[in-house]
Structure formats: C-alpha cells, structure tokens
Image (spheres, rainbow, N blue to C red):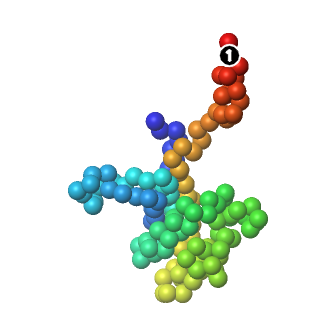
C-alpha cells in the first residue's frame, strides 16, 4: 500500500538516489529495480559530474535523518550536519568543496526520505498485562 508520495522539481539539474539494503528484485538480474528498507531522493542544481556526490548526500540523509534542508544546526538541518563521508566538513562545506574542482557549486533544492513502516500507527501492547488478563479469566 502506498502511504505517501512526493515529487522533486529539478528543472535543470540532477536527482541523486540511494536505497539502503538494496538487492535486485530478481535473483538472476543485477540491473532490476532495487528494494530496501530506506530510500532517499536528492534534487540539486548541479553538473552531471556531481552525481557521485549527490549519491553520497543521499546516503548521508538515509543515516542521519535530517529534518530540513537548511536552518540552525540544533534543528537537524541537513546543510549544517557533519558530512558522513568526511566529518571535518559540514554538508554545506562538502558542496562548496565540490566547486573547487572547476565546476559550479551544486545547490541542493530538496530531498525526500522514505522508510518501510514509516507513519504506520502501532498499537502499544503490554504483553505482561495481556498474559495476566488471560490467567484471570474463569
């Protein structure tokens, strides 16, 4: 069942993707769609040469669960988090460093992170109370 969907508007740029725990859907095919527990999409105004960096940023998002693209560091903003692949940089600094390589600096536009089971309400069950109730029945 599909519980949520989103679109990333990237008029002139790239969409980076990462699926955590990805395995091909067909055991004999390595080029089929991947399924996994966490999936991330990152939209950026960036040159095609920056696709590997966008994949790394998508991996970062999968692990660090940022709450917003930009904002105060204590708010969990993506651009202010220490970068997963080089924690001496923030994600913002990693994007700036990418421009030093002779191309324009990638500018993140949006991201989406999905996790299996996310948003499903779960009933809290007190197993001990349930067993005790069963023992008290006549």
Residue 64 percent coordinates (x, y): 61, 63
Q: Position of residue 1 (x, y in %)?
A: 46, 36
Q: Nearer the viewer, residue 120 or 78?
A: 120
- Image quadrant for the C terminus? top right
Residue, disc 1: 137
Residue at the image point whose x is 23% and y is 56% from the top: 28
Query: Residue drawn 71% across and 19% down?
Result: 136
**x 51%, y 44%: residue:** 5
Residue 107 can be seen in this image: yes
Name the spot of residue 105 as percent of width and height, x first.
55, 78
**Label 1 packing within 10 angstroms: few (<14), some (14-19), many (20+):** few
Is 46 drawn above or below residue 98 in the view shown?
Answer: above
Whole-percent x, y for residue 32 in the image? 29, 55
Residue 38 drawn above or below residue 13: above
Task: Return the residue nearer the eye: 116 or 126.
Answer: 126
Residue 8 in view in this figure: no
Residue lying at the far left in this picture: please name it.
28
Residue at screen point 55% across, 54% down: 113
> How many marks are shown on the rendered structure?
1
> Picture quarter containing residue 99?
bottom right
Q: Tell me where residue 89 sits by quadrant.
A: bottom right
> Please, is residue 64 above or below residue 49 in the view?
above
Under circle 1, the secondary element is loop
């Amino acid at each position: 069942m599909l519980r949520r969907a989103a679109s990333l508007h990237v008029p002139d740029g790239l969409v980076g993707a990462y699926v955590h725990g990805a395995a091909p859907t067909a055991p004999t095919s390595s080029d089929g769609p991947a399924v996994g527990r966490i999936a991330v999409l990152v939209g950026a105004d960036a040159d095609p040469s920056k696709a590997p960096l966008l994949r790394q940023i998508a991996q970062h998002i999968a692990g660090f669960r940022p709450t917003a693209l930009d904002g105060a560091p204590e708010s969990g903003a993506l651009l202010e988090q220490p970068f997963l692949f080089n924690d001496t940089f923030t994600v913002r600094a990693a994007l700036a460093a990418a421009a030093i390589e002779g191309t324009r600096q990638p500018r993140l536009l949006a991201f989406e992170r999905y996790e299996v089971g996310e948003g499903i309400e779960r009933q809290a069950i007190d197993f001990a109370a349930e067993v005790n109730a069963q023992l008290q029945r006549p």
